Image (tube, rainbow, N blue to C red):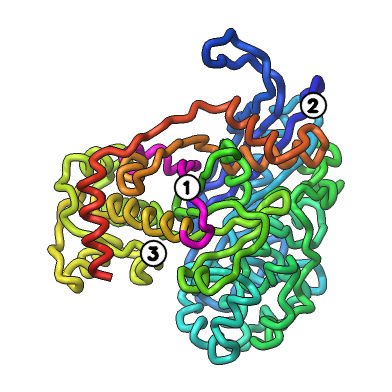
Amino acid sequence: MAQVKRYIAVDLGAESGRVMLGSVRHGLVARENTAKMAVPRLILEEIHRFDNGPVEENPAENKKESPFSPDRSSAGLRWDFNKLLGKVKTGIAKAVKAARTQAWGIGIDSWGVDFGLIDGDGKLVENPYHYRDSRTNGMMEKAFELMEKRKIYENTGLQFMQFNSVYQLLAMRLAGSAALAKAKNLIFMADLLSYYLCGKVFAEYTLASTSQFMDMKTGQWSREVLKKLSLPINIMPKIVQPGTVVGQLSAKTGIELGCGPIPVIAIGSHDTASAVAAVPADENTGWAYLSSGTWSLMGVETPKAIITDKTFEYEFTNEGGVENTIRLLKNIMGLWLIQESKRQWQREGTDLSYPELTKMAEKAEPFASHIEVDNSAFLAPGDMPKRINEYLTNTGQKATDDKGQLIRIMLESLALRYRQVLEALEDVTGKSIEVLHIVGGGIQNELLCQFTANATGKKVITGPIEATASGNILMQAKATGQIKSLTEARKIVRNSFELKEYQPQDTALWQEQYKKIKSQN
């Protein structure tokens, strides 16, 4: 690894996006009881960060021209794709300049389930819908009328959530969508951005696996599900594996960005797949991961899909991972509850930072109330504090206007939910979990990390924050032959970032609360 290879990672989240420049090179690391030694390390540099979020499109608004001339004829909660693409290109151009030499790859990751539709002329038909758009309300029930719920799970192994791609697509079909009628290709969000960079149509495996119309036993589209729901299989692109070089930046894009033909690499294009690739786990220890951000995704890595009566009962999801792995996991509502509450208070004129809210929560009364964090009432954007208070009132608990108290209720409820899921994972796999690795931006909330250790009774290790970008870069390095395996990639992560350990505290008190919640269910 004498030659320094630089890679560009585009990491897109539901709230923000970032473009990182990364490389794997030898650097000095202190080892316990030994002198510093040179080992492979991952070096990351943030080049460009930008806000991201949905827009409420109004059919009465004047149409705006864009390079792909989207059809804005129907309202809804959507992604402004042209704006997002512009921000991504700005970041890549900055990264190209910062790299000083030609970059060896560009990899894009994003959230799952959302997609764009491309017409016969290769243009985006309309702005992609946001997964929280209300048009999927009731779609799961419609799907179960056409195909038995258990049969859908046997085919796809996926957790039932109303925003899964299959229900988005079914909503379009049942509404007689003009956009769907024009579609030649369906492309998921990260791959859609790659398409606009290199012109190649593809579906990266980990991202496609979030759709609930992939057969997780074969890794290909489920013809049975698509046929039963009368959804078009002809628009589904070829599935490619993580680590595939799918194309090169087009000449036109290269001129625009000021660079040559950089390879575009399909990494673990689902952000959680990239994050899990960067979990600094010791593979000789029983471990689980928690990717903590807007969503909390908790799971274990398995060599193949586990689709059983137990996983169906627990509603575990089997999603694709890198290097022929499966991410057996559970989607949990996550820090969305706090993010949306913060936005509401800001709208009301009180602008509090996340550290301020956490400090207020730390001083609040312990275990004053409890919420079911995955309740569907908390899914859509809006007045989250009001919804939580309505939930408390409806469940015979005491509502509160105390912001710190509300935040503490959310954090404690999340931690207790993590314990429920962790126990279910142990039940399903028959294996004991000794360590929970938490990665992602959520590790900055140290109170939640400590609560998680307390609630689960497990050792919690946190870091890195930029796990998704790290996994993105490392899979590019593997695609170019710079590193050889996932085991090597995780060792590099351990060499590269400071990790923090949390030991369980007040376990008797948390055990009492957990028993109380279980008895009420």
Residue 258 in view in this figure: no
Q: Tag 2's secondary structure?
A: loop
Q: Is residue 216 left or right of residue 17?
A: right
Q: Is residue 291 left or right of residue 238?
A: left
Q: Which amino acid, by three-letter code, is at mark 1? A: Ile
Return the disc, 2 or 1, that comes first in the chain's sequence: 2
Question: To which residue does mark 1 refer?
Answer: 433
Q: Residue 381 — which label? A: 3
The residue under the point 51% across, 57% down is 430
38 in relation to 134, above or below: above
Q: Residues within 10 Å of mark 3 (few under 14, many from 20)?
A: some
CA distance separating discs 3 and 1: 34 Å
317 in relation to 120, above or below: above
Q: Which is more toward the observer, 159 or 428?
A: 428
The span picked out in magenta is: 427-448
Question: To which residue does mark 2 refer?
Answer: 101
Return the disc, 2 or 3, that comes first in the chain's sequence: 2
Question: Which of the 4 quarters of the picture holds residue 473?
Answer: top right
Nearest to viewer (mark 2 / mark 1)? 1
Q: Tag 3's secondary structure?
A: loop
**x and y percentages locating residue 433 in the rendered image:** 47, 47
Nearest to viewer (mark 3 / mark 1)? 1
CA distance separating discs 2 and 3: 43 Å
The residue under the point 46% across, 43% down is 434
Q: Tag 1's secondary structure?
A: loop
**x and y percentages locating residue 456 in the rendered image:** 35, 48
